[in-house]
Amino acid sequence: PDPNAQIEFPPPGQVISQPIALIGTATHPAFQFYKVEIQGPYTGGQWVTLGDIVRQPVIRGQLWVFDPRPFFPQPGRYRLRVVVVDIAAREAALCEIPVVIAPPESGG
C-alpha cells in the first residue's frame, strides 16, 4: 500500500447505512489536492467525485464525511477511494476499498 494514500476506517467490506467519517492519509511531497471518489451500481460503474476537492493534506485524520443516503435507491457493493493529485496534475497516490451500502433496517 502507498503510504501517501490510505483509508484506515472504515475497514474493507464495511456495511454503511449512515454517514461516517473516512479516516486516513492523503499527502505527497508534491501535493496539490486530494479527492474522494465512489464507484458502484448507482454511478453506472464510473468513478464519481464526492463533493469538492480538498486542498489540505491529511495525515491519519478525517478525510471526508461520507453520506450513503443518496445511494440508497441502488444499495449493494461499492468502492470508495482517496486520490492524491500532485502539482503536475498526476494521480500520485490512491487507496481503494470495497464497501457495502445498505439502507438502515426499518423497525425497532
Image (cartoon, rainbow, N blue to C red):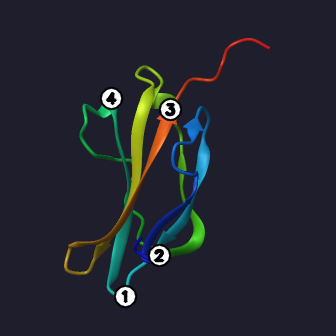
Q: Secondary structure at mark 2?
A: loop
**Residue picked out by circle 1:** 29
**Residue picked out by circle 3:** 101
Q: Residues within 10 Å of mark 4 (few under 14, many from 20)?
A: some
**Contact, mark 4 vs mark 2 (Cβ under 8 Å):** no
User: Of label 4 and label 1, which has the lower sequence position?
Assistant: 1
Q: Position of residue 72 (x, y in %)?
A: 48, 24
Q: Position of residue 66 (x, y in %)?
A: 52, 45
Residue type at the position of mark 1: Pro
Q: Residues within 10 Å of mark 3 (few under 14, many from 20)?
A: many
Identified at 27% across, 45% down, the residue is 47
**Residue picked out by circle 4:** 41
Q: Nearer the viewer, residue 74 or 100?
A: 100
User: Of label 2 and label 1, which has the lower sequence position?
Assistant: 1
Q: Secondary structure at mark 3?
A: strand
**Contact, mark 3 vs mark 4 (Cβ under 8 Å):** no
Q: Secondary structure at mark 4?
A: helix
User: Of label 4 and label 2, which has the lower sequence position?
Assistant: 4
**Contact, mark 3 vs mark 1 (Cβ under 8 Å):** no
**Residue picked out by circle 2:** 57
Residue type at the position of mark 2: Pro
User: Of label 3 and label 4, which has the lower sequence position?
Assistant: 4
